[in-house]
Image: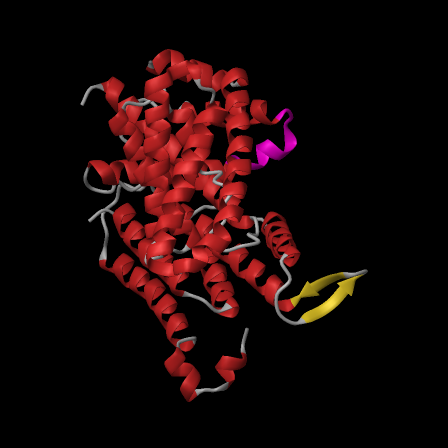
């Protein structure tokens, strides 16, 4: 492994640590409905687009899911399945949108796509194994809250990309 | 075996203990125990930030009223269940932060590629939790986050993290760490369903 690729792996670990840190902040915020999440830990994933390769991006996704499971105490329960499936579909969609459209779509659009993918995937799993027909009752609330939080996260990511010196330097050195 | 690896293993057992604990009192006991361990390994303990964390998380949870109403502020009910859930979460967080410091302060190297990345992730997490209070003081937010990340980024040089504790384990270390894990197991046993059936008063504890 070259020194450059080692630095990139270090950066993946730093992004993963940020996701873990944001998971702890999110954990402090009460949820009106179980399973409902702000998705703060997705910010590093949104920012990582365009910095990391696909492989590094999925490594970050894996570390984020494990960290989230550890913080919320769900790592040994079936709830980690929801988190894993939701995060995977969200990460896949965000990566696809970014690779297909590059700068034509803002981080708000990418974040919205990711949230939509994650919510639909979680609702499908919930329909199959947990709430059955009752899923349709909670679906609108889930979708709506997911969309709102993803817009806020996307706006923050946009702002961070434009204003952060750290991020600008990182992009210069890694891309 | 290096001392840092032994501490990592015992920390992993402690984290499993944190995750298995459900009762508020048990989580409190484990949190206090972990704070003592982390303080011994060099982490500075400050009561006020932890107290603020506990109070704010507990209070934030009162927005979703649950359980017995203890008192009301105007028409706003403060419920025991919501406070208890909030406090439980706060203890989980505090214990996790101190446990990760306890595990990572001697910068152990987890074997394998993924292990190396995970140990780095926890090392940076420890740095973030130690320095995050900068964000509160500095404005604007993005500038403060920048400052925090630029400070941590200085360490990124592509070199594996060097253990600060390079000595090898002696028998005494193993006994001490087994003792630490035993305390966690003992606490879990005291609050287990089996113990509750033998000593009913345990079931009355929060």
Is residue A119 left or right of B176 when viewed as pictured? right
- Give the quarter of the figure containing the C terminus of chain A: top left
Residue A22 coordinates in the image, percent (x, y): 48, 39
**Is residue A31 covered in magenta?**
no
Q: Is residue B83 above or below residue A3?
A: below
Res. B161 in view: no
- Give the quarter of the figure containing the N terminus of chain A: top left
Residue B196 coordinates in the image, percent (x, y): 43, 82
The residue positioned 49% from the left and 43% from the top of the image is A143
Q: Is residue A175 above or below residue A33?
A: above
Q: Is residue A98 above or below residue B114?
A: above
Is residue B52 left or right of A55 when viewed as pictured? right
Q: What is the magenta range?
A: B131-140
Residue A135 coordinates in the image, percent (x, y): 44, 55
Is residue A153 left or right of A60 when viewed as pictured? right
For this rendering, which residue is in front, B92 or B12? B92
Residue at the top extreme? A172
């Amino acid at each position: 492994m070259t020194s450059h690729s080692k630095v990139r792996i270090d950066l993946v670990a730093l992004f993963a640590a940020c996701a873990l840190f944001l998971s702890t902040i999110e954990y402090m915020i009460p949820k009106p409905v179980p399973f409902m999440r702000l998705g703060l830990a997705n910010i590093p994933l949104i920012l990582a687009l365009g910095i990391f390769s696909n492989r590094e991006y999925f490594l970050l996704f894996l570390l984020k899911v494990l960290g989230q499971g550890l913080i919320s105490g769900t790592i040994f329960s079936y709830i980690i399945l929801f988190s894993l499936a939701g995060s995977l579909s969200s990460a896949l969609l965000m990566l696809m949108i970014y690779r297909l459209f590059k700068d034509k779509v803002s981080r708000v659009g990418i974040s919205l796509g990711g949230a939509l993918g994650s919510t639909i995937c979680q609702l499908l799993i919930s329909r199959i194994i947990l709430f059955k027909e009752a899923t349709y009752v909670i679906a609108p609330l889930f979708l709506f809250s997911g969309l709102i939080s993803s817009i806020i996260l996307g706006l923050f990511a946009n702002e961070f990309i434009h204003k952060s010196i750290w991020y600008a330097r990182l992009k210069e050195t890694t891309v | 075996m290096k001392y840092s690896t032994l501490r990592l293993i015992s920390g992993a057992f402690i984290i499993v203990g944190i995750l298995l604990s459900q009762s508020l009192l048990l989580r409190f006991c484990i949190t206090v125990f972990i704070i003592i361990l982390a303080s011994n390994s060099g982490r500075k303990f400050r009561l006020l930030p932890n107290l603020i964390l506990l109070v704010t998380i507990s209070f934030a949870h009162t927005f979703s009223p649950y359980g017995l109403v203890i008192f009301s502020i105007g028409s706003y009910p403060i419920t025991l269940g919501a406070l208890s859930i909030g406090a439980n979460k706060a203890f989980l967080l505090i214990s996790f932060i101190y446990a990760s410091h306890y595990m990572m302060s001697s910068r152990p190297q987890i074997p394998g590629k993924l292990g190396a990345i995970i140990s780095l992730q926890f090392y940076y997490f420890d740095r973030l939790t130690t320095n995050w209070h900068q964000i509160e003081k500095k404005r604007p937010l993005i500038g403060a986050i920048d400052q925090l990340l630029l400070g941590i980024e200085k360490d990124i040089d592509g070199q594996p993290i060097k253990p600060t504790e390079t000595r090898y384990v002696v028998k005494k270390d193993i006994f001490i760490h087994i003792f630490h894990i035993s305390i966690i197991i003992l606490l879990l046993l005291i609050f287990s369903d089996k113990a509750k059936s033998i000593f009913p008063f345990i079931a009355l504890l929060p």
